[in-house]
Image: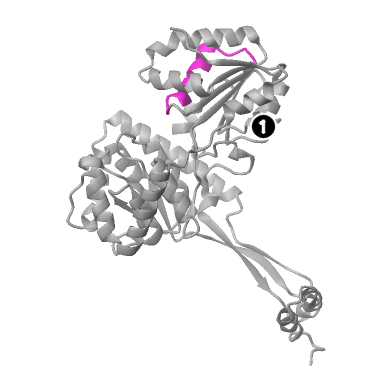
């Protein structure tokens, strides 16, 4: 049965309206979820461990006498790593090494070091860069198990120099995923609690007698987790509120259409709301991709999810040329952007807005998800226009450093006093003037 994926043409007069209709996505704020999250957060803030324990028993059917009993010993993480099948362990260790290597390079290049300079009058100005004291990582449990996300969240925090990394992961009915636990060990996680949901976010944000309060919470989760992260922002930092996964493929028609079809599938299989779009100037090639989609879809275990995703939010778009494809890509600002073309670097120079850019036909987005090295926690829903992938820089904070010399206080005092009087803030002005030699 042929899939009904929409086809658009950039030459159509209503193209931009049609495109933005495809892109439109607003996370529905379910009032019942919001009310429940507010109640859970307030309860955890007020009752701490007792509330966390009750919600864990209710939602995860996990019986424990104390929250202490929900913390996993490091020996269990070590046993999980030792128990992995050798080939899978090797893959996990290789991925961890590549992710760590990339973020260590990023640390050197991203302005992670303190600096200062001295002006002619002896005034010293600069910036002090320090890592966060403690980071919290939320890892989905139950149906979903994402060891790759453990590595992507924990490793940049560890490379940044965060003193303590606390991971929370729900384990419904006590079922633990050994690959997730092994990833936690390789990622440098210090403590692991088998709790989840809004109660875990609240515990990390406010702290309890057992679970320490963190400075920033990172990691994906369901609607309850996303709502909780949004509500605790300000008490703690958060990475982002991520929307459905997205891939945009720019292809000049020279790649195997089956490769392109499978790349579109790779995001569509995440969930029904994921978005997969192809931009191509070759109408005949678009037809071959559509044929490949119809051919390959029945072979996919998650074909029902892929079909709904492609039919509801996917698109095959005919463009005038690759230059126009790049312009449209900048408007879409996708999470993942593949440039599958003979001259990927040429077209890549035209891209301004994308979470991650995959250059060349051999660079499948899936390699970035697992083991290429750059972080796979990326901005979605057009937020790549103003935000960046998760990185080492997300686990630093910067303090301005100002040391004014006696001579500098004369010139700066005059400037500050004049502006302060202009703002009607006399104490500011007098504070500066007291340091000036001619002050009374």
Q: Is residue 245 magenta?
A: no
Horizontal relation, residue 217 to residue 171: left or right: right
Q: Residues within 10 Å of mark 1 (few under 14, many from 20)?
A: some
Q: Is residue 265 magenta?
A: yes
Between residue 199 and residue 411, name the one nearer to us.
199
Horizontal relation, residue 324 to residue 336: left or right: right
Residue 55 position within the rendered picture, expressed as x and y whole percent measured from the top left: 27, 51
Residue 335 position within the rendered picture, expressed as x and y whole percent measured from the top left: 55, 34
Image quadrant in which the N terminus is located:
top left
Q: Is residue 280 above or below residue 64?
A: above
Residue 130 position within the rendered picture, expressed as x and y whole percent measured from the top left: 53, 61
Q: Is residue 203 at all visible to an observer of this figure?
A: yes
Q: Is residue 345 at all visible to an observer of this figure?
A: no
Q: Please identify the quarter of the rendering in which residue 173 is found.
A: top left
- Residue furthest to the front in view is 31
Residue 259 position within the rendered picture, expressed as x and y whole percent measured from the top left: 51, 15
Residue at (62%, 6%) from the top-left corner? 284
Residue at (55%, 45%) from the top-left corner? 105
Range of residues picked out in magenta: 251-271
Q: Which residue is mark 1?
A: 330
Q: Is residue 416 above or below residue 163?
A: below
Between residue 429 and residue 7, name the one nearer to us.
7
Between residue 432 and residue 392, name the one nearer to us.
432
Residue at (47%, 50%) from the top-left corner? 230
Image quadrant in which the C terminus is located:
bottom right
Q: Give the colouring mode of the picture.
A: one colour
The total number of labels drawn is: 1
Residue at (25%, 41%) from the top-left corner? 172
Kind of element beneath mark 1: helix
């Amino acid at each position: 049965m042929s899939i009904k994926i929409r086809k658009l043409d950039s030459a159509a007069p209503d193209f931009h309206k049609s495109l933005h209709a495809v892109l439109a996505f607003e996370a529905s704020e379910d009032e019942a979820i919001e009310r429940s999250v507010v109640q859970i957060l307030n309860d955890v803030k007020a009752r701490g461990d007792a509330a966390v324990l009750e919600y864990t028993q209710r939602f995860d059917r996990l019986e424990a006498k104390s929250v202490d009993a929900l913390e996993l010993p490091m020996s269990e993480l070590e046993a999980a790593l030792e128990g992995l099948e050798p080939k899978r362990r090797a893959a996990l260790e290789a991925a961890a090494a590549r992710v760590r290597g990339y973020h260590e390079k990023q640390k050197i290049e991203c302005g992670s070091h303190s600096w200062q300079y001295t002006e002619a009058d002896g005034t010293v100005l600069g910036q002090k860069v320090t890592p966060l004291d403690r980071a919290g990582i939320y890892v989905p449990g139950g149906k979903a198990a994402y060891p790759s996300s453990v590595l992507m969240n924990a490793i940049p925090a560890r490379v940044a120099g965060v003193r303590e990394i606390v991971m929370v992961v729900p384990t419904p009915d006590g079922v633990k995923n050994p690959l997730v636990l092994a990833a936690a060990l390789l990622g440098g996680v210090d403590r692991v609690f088998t709790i989840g949901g809004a109660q875990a976010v609240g515990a990390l944000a406010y702290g309890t007698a057992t679970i320490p309060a963190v400075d920033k919470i990172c990691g994906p989760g369901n609607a309850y987790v996303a709502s909780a992260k949004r509500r605790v922002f300000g008490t703690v930092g958060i990475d982002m509120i991520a929307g459905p996964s997205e891939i945009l493929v720019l292809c000049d028609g020279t790649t195997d259409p089956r490769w392109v079809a499978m790349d579109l599938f790779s995001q569509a299989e995440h969930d029904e709301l994921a978005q997969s779009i192809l931009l191509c100037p070759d109408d005949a090639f678009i037809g071959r991709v559509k044929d490949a989609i119809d051919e390959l879809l029945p072979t996919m275990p998650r074909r029902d999810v892929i079909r709904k995703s492609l039919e509801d939010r996917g698109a095959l778009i005919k463009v005038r040329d690759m230059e126009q494809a790049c312009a449209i890509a900048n408007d879409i600002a996708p999470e993942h952007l593949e440039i599958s073309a003979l001259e990927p670097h040429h077209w890549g120079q035209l891209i301004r807005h994308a979470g991650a850019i995959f250059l060349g036909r051999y660079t499948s987005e899936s390699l970035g998800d697992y083991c290429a090295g750059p972080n796979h926690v990326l901005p979605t829903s057009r937020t790549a226009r103003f935000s960046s992938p998760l990185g080492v820089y997300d686990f630093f904070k910067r303090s301005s450093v100002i040391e004014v010399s006696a001579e500098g206080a004369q010139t700066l005092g005059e400037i500050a006093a004049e502006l302060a009087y202009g703002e009607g803030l006399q104490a500011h002005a007098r504070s500066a003037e007291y340091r000036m030699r001619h002050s009374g």
